[in-house]
Amino acid sequence: MTQTTLTPDAIAAYIASRIPGARNVRVEGLSQIPGGASRQTFRFRLQYDGDDGPVDRKLIMRRDPPASLIDTERHIEYAAYHAFYDVPGVPVPRMLWLENDPAALDGAFFIAEEISGFESGPMAIIAEPYLSQASRLADRKWTILGEINRADPAALGLTEVMAVPAPDQCWRRELDHWEKIIDEDELEPQPIIRAAIRWLRANPPGPAQKISVVHGDYRTGNFLYDAQGEIHGILDWEMCHLGDPLEDLGWGLNRIWCWGGDERRGGLVPRESAIAIWEKASGLKADPADLHWWELFNCVKGQGIWISSAKAWDDGTNREPILAFSAWRMLNTQDRAALDLMERL
Amino acid sequence: MTPNPQAILADFAARLGGQIMPDLKTPYAMSSAGLMTAVLGMLAEQFDGAAANLVEENRAIRALFNEAAELTLPGDLGARIGQLSAGVDDDLRLSALQAANRGLRAALIDLHAWAEVEPAAKALNDAIWRELSMSTERRRVSSAPF
């Protein structure tokens, strides 16, 4: 399935329609950049003559592909970014425009300001100059997650755009959702993850201690960091929803994100250190049994993502290399992570 | 099959990642080439052993089914397991081996679900878990983070 190639003129024409009074609107340096597993990501420079003089801004566009690794509504992602822009301690890029009509540029999209000049790669974080800042980066990473989970979804306006589950139904809603995705997309039977699903249904966790904003994909690779150990932007909110905050913590602790091939979660610090940072920042408790449930659940969720990516590549819906790569590298790794949690590896 | 397909895949991966990728002009092109390099490398790693691993796994699952045949299985499951346990991999094309593997693993899921709640099937349940663990070793790629 092909999609129209974006042109600077087409983007400029769209933006001109969104900025009353803007004259001589130009888009320069348009290029696609990595990070488009769930959306295609483009970087460009916007220049125009405004009422107060010339304007020059670095922007990012995230456009829906024909099929993505994660099928989500971009208005949810946009709302999450927008909500946290004014929250101290949670750095996110400023959202500018959301376009839900795919006819505008052959795919729904949003445009945001670029946070430029920082690293995001998950493998870079386990090497210098970042390695020596691992402790600081871990503190920032799990403190920011604590801030996200501590926030009041209603005060942020997110209960108006996201479903609010009952505290005792968070687990069921998420497990139903991801099991359905596996049912629909699996190209081959998944005996390990099916066993995990059976265990999860037979041993549900306690009710959520609060209904939190759940980022949904909070991991190394989805934030912008520097060599001083600071984090400058939390990205990829496409799976954001309201639910149990332990879901977010469990996702970030998943063994599949142990980029160094050792015990350091997210390539940064051991599991218990990450939990302690999160508890301090969030004011919440990570009950061991409940967290174990959410960690195993996140193996199901991960497998749902890798299975969907394999399906999208295999049926030709989306032939981005990241989809084939993710399936080949992660399907078995995710199984091993699940076995490890079930003490069957 | 000369030159050796595994060597071709590994060499192309190395050239794409080491020689071609650095000359690409955009971050997206470089990233895509890097991902292709990684996939080619994984294919090279798996190529030689792919058929052998599937044969080994299919045999292991059929052995579990033979073990299960000594227990009292529910009617439909018993018949299905009995039929699959008698299978033989006489077609060694990967597509044929994979098709057989998928049928076997689908039945294994149902057998496992039964065995884990059936007290008389505890040994079988443990054996299934061991085989599932072994299956991840067969599929393991060296670059995987875990």
Image (cartoon, rainbow, N blue to C red):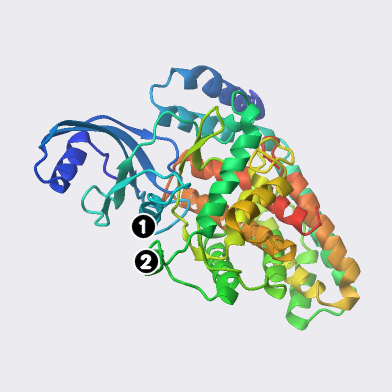
Q: Mark 2 points at which residue?
A: A161
Give the residue type that dot 2 points to. Val
- Which residue is found at the position 59% from the left and 28% from the top? A130
- Which residue is found at the position 65% from the left and 38% from the top? A267
Give how far across and how far down residue B114 sits, in percent: 78, 75
Mark 2 on the same chain as mark 1: yes
Disc 1: CA contacts within 10 A as few (<14), some (14-19) or many (>=20) = many
The C terminus of chain B lies in quadrant: top right
Among the 4 quarters of the image, the one containing residue B3: top right
The residues tagged by marks 2 and 1 sit, at their Cα atoms, a distance apart of 8 Å
Give how far across and how far down residue B122 sits, in percent: 89, 70
- Which residue is found at the position 42% from the left and 47% from the top? A318
- Rendered image: mark on residue B42: none
Res A156 visible: yes
Q: Mark 1 points at which residue?
A: A79
Chain of the residue under the numbered disc 1 shown in the image: A
Disc 2: CA contacts within 10 A as few (<14), some (14-19) or many (>=20) = few
Name the foreground residue: A82 vs B122: A82
Give how far across and how far down residue A228 sits, in percent: 55, 28
Vertical position of residue A256 compared to residue A180: above or below: above
Could you tell me if the residues under marks 2 and 1 are in contact, i.e. CB atoms within 8 Å? yes
Residue reaching furthest bottom?
B75
- Which residue is found at the position 77% from the left and 70% from the top? B111
Res A302 visible: no
